[in-house]
Amino acid sequence: MRITRAGAAVSALAAGALLLSACTSPAQNDEADGNTSPTAATVEPTGSCKPDLGGVETADGNISYSVGEAEFLGYNSNTPETYSTYNTAVTDRLIGGFWYWGVDGSVCRDEAFGTYEAISEDPLQVRYTIADDATWSDGTPITYADFLLDWAAQAITTDGTVTTDGSETALFNHISGLTLGDYVPEGPKADSADAKSFQYDYERVYADWEIQISGPFPAHVVAEQAGVSTEQLVEAIHNLDMSVLQPAAEFWNTGWLSQTPGELPDPALVPVSGPYTFKEGGWVAGQSITLTANENYWGTPAATRELTFRFAPADTHVQALQNGDLDVIEPQATVDTVAQLEAIGSSITITTGQTLTWEHLDFNFGAGPFADSLPLREAFAYCVPRQEIVDNLIKPVDDSAEVMNAREVFPFQDGYDEVVEAAYDGRYDQVDLDQAKAKFEEAGATAPVQVRIGYSAPNPRRAEEVASIKASCDQVGFEVQDVGSADFFDTVLPNGDYEVALFAWAGSGQIASGQNIYSSTGTQNYGKYSDAEVDAAWETLASSADPEVHTEQVKIIEKKLWDTLYGIPLFAHPGVAAYSSTLQNVRDSAAQSGAVWNAEQWSRAS
Amino acid sequence: MLKFILRRVAVSAVVLLAASFLMFVLTINSGDPLKDLRESNATNKQQLIDARIAFMGLDLPWYERYWNWLKGVGGCFTGQCDLGVTANNVDVLSLTTQAAGATLRLVTLATLLAIVVGVALGILTAIRQYSGFDYSVTFGAFLFFSLPVFWAAVLLKEYGAIRYNDWIATGQYQPVTILVSAAVLGFVLQAVLGGDRRRRLLTAGGTFAFVTVVMFVLNALDWYRNPMFGAGMVLLVSAGAGVVVTALVTGFGNRRVLYGALTTAVVGVVAYFVFAPVLLDPSWLSLIGLFLLAVVVSLGIGYAWGGYARRQAMLVTLVTGVLTSLAVVFDILVAHWSSFLGLKSRPISTIGAATPNFTGGFWESVLDMGAQILLPTVLLTLISVASYSRYTRSSMLEVMGQDYVRTARAKGLSERAVITKHAFRNALIPITTIVAFDFAGLIGGAVITERVFGWKGMGALFADGLNHVDPAPVMAFFLVTGVAAVLMNLVADIIYASLDPRIRR
């Protein structure tokens, strides 16, 4: 009885509540609706550069991407304080240039910006021509003046002179120091300040000339801030007039930095030459910065109007992608993340591949048992299970992973097979314990030979690598010790407290950067390796601008490094990118910039 | 009293100074600020290292670096604060202001909720000591207290954000889900309310039937995607709140108080219609103004109805007025939900404090911020509720065993009066200290919560600074948290004195 009555009361209450809720309150209003817009075509990419998408029309919409939690630092990514992959991910969208990095780390020319050509290889002379319609977003043409300032920022010292050897204190706080001024003390030459064409005459041949000159900052803004006209600034650079150069450098060093997060610079100060520009009110401190398509861009316009960079830590990316908070992510390339991504299903697309960072074992030639004994190094190379390491640790992340057999070229680059064929016969591909023992005896070593393998800890993957090396090499007579520590780069490596160093070099894309690592006097030759033939080959390579000479010398160097066993290359680090399956034209890149390299081509299928 | 406060402040200043010195020295010795450059293979590596040494002053002796920092902070007293710049040349003062703002937004709501829920749970479990409800809450408290935050956050994102967003696309509950949730709610409610077997059965059955019917009807109305609340419901909720508040504070003996509370609810709803144009397109300023007006009017109603129990009546109408305002805001938000869904089809985000480039009106933006703050707030609340409820429970139990509570019962006071008047007030005293300290601690930022939800608060400031062995942001973090700790300590002492008359003497 009571229950029935209670039930009736409940129903009455529920009905009453619904009745009451049916009363409209003042706050009822209409729904908003979205709209659709045209999208760019998909083009299957061939080669390592950006494919031509045809007639692209900028579609309304927003694509969201994250490099990591680092805050945007400012328009000028070229100061040592602001230079980072986080900041260049944004500024590379703003500043166009003569070339960009392709997906395999090769140089791709951007013909829309301009063309260049080495008119003479020795002495090296390069002719640059800026496209006629290339202009800053404020309407000022991009001219010789911009490139002259670009040179000045890498050439002039605080004493008001052009650098003589690149070691003086620079007037401009440029990340590249005074290297360019060292190679080209005369600077670029042109007929007038507003010339569209100019020429670089190198004092001595520079193998990496191509990547020296890219996209400049707007000289007319610097001139205005220094209180002179662009012509006067050009004059001042030619005459090294410090009364103009001082304030110009002052502005260059500080005026383009955003010291208060969230406050965009005055639009008049930051004209752009790329497909994107800052969106007004698009920067929220600690949260995100949004770029919007540059209306005045003369080249192929951005496929999607807005591009948002969110400052989110890498470990939040996978779920954010699944929830649609991010559209493109590059999470840490681990087995766990790949499994997590695969579990999401078809709403996202995963790409894996190799990157331009490669892992290697380097012997210590300064001291220890390996220093003077080639047979002992060979014995060690025979027992290092390279294939096993790649199969167990890298393949689960990236199917295409393979053992790397070269140092200056990567497996996914053109010319890798050619170089490897010339330099290496495949003898260390498989573990050969008998050979290793024979070499061990030939070296006259008595077991156990202590081998301390140092690396920068904590790093679980490297700890596992050391463990598999230990399992294999201890059978030969080595006694492998894991001496990974947090101060590896700080103290262990410079002091030489190791027999074998395990670390990775990030490929710079430069042709001659290896000279620092492998030549006797190189500043990054931590293991104190020295070989006259290698030194000479690097000398030849670095002082030539001819790609064929480069390939020939690389073959010589690689062969010698294998024969004398500088160290043992292991593998190129795997990379993972994932993106919402509604996006088109997303393509991961092996270069440091990562997937964002072609962001202006991303578009959303409607 | 003033002398006491001044002495405390002076001592605290000395402690802060000494601690800042220790903190600075520890920070600059905590690692290698050149680590990333040492691993670099740039051709001009040495130049870059030299540049950073000069920029960060790494070549100066430690006492000189500390002195430089202290000079900058000293400027704060003359209005020229200089907290330095980070290794990335970002101004630390503005960074700190933004971080403190973000953290305050994140933790204020969570702390308030945790206090209300925690204290309520603590009292309920103390009253129903050793009941099934008590055991369940105790179990839950220990479970949540020991939750690893990063793991709980991942789960919350999976179920609270991703799965919820998938579900809201259709917004229909399955019949099984409805029956199960109704059964669970019925079970929980009977455990809380207690009584003999018949009464428990009745409570559970009634709740089950009510929830089932409501949820089916809401399904039919597509309520979760196009919800409405309505002025009628606002009136019902405010009136109900008035009744409950009256019951808790004075009981129904004095009808004038009850009438005061009901009048407040009615006036509130009428005001809702009167001020609708302002309310539907407000600014924060006009909202605050209206809220203050609501407070004044509520107090006025209490004053007019009060009679001999004027103070109590005013308290009741004030609380009712505030709750009515909240009900009105809730109604407005509910009405904007469907247009918010139109702007953002996946409402709950896993990262960030606001949707980038969100284009809605005022209330849609409020909903957006609310949707973003929801998950971290739930997480922070769950964790702090655990400790609050435990403290309140033990403190309440202790007080309930005191002689004066027995005396109060013996002289024939109602159980309500015993608990709210005699037990609860005294049980609050030790809680105050904990709340004050907790709040100071929370301003320090919930490092992990901030990180997993992509907020840039004080925790991130501290962690980033320490990672780069960059003293400026770490010291800024220390300044804010240190000063907050000192201030909150002081506040706790003052509140203590006002709650406990024995201390004032």
Image (cartoon, grey):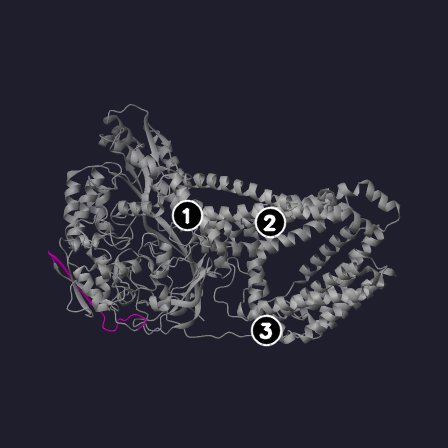
Tag shown at residue B281? 3
Which image quarter is the C terminus of chain A in? Answer: bottom left
Q: Nearer the viewer, residue B43 or A153?
A: A153
Q: Secondary structure at mark 3?
A: loop
Residue A571 in sight here: no
Confirm whether circles 1 and 2 share one chain: no
Q: Residue A359 in the image: state x and y as whole percent.
A: 32, 44
Q: Which residue is mark 2?
A: B439
Residue B307 as seen in the image, left or right of residue B373: right
Q: Amino acid at mark 3?
A: Asp
Read off the magenta span: A121-138
Q: In the rendered image of this protein, does residue A147 appear above or below residue B412?
A: below
Mark 3, Cα crowd under 10 Å, few <14 / some 14-19 / many 20+, is few
Chain of the residue that carries numbered disc 1 in the rendered image: A
Q: Nearer the viewer, residue A530 or A218?
A: A218
Q: Nearer the viewer, residue B372 or B275?
A: B275
Q: CA distance from mark 3 to mark 1?
A: 55 Å
Nearer the camera: disc 3 or disc 1? 3
Q: In the rendered image of this protein, does residue A350 appear above or below residue A573?
A: below
Quadrant of res A64? bottom left
Tag shown at residue A207? none
Q: Residue B447 in the image: state x and y as whole percent.
A: 52, 48
Q: Residue A166 in the image: state x and y as whole percent.
A: 20, 49
Let me know if residue A123 is in the magenta part: yes
Chain of the residue that carries numbered disc 2 in the rendered image: B
Q: Amino acid at mark 2?
A: Phe
Chain of the residue that carries numbered disc 3 in the rendered image: B
Q: CA distance from mark 1 to mark 2?
A: 46 Å
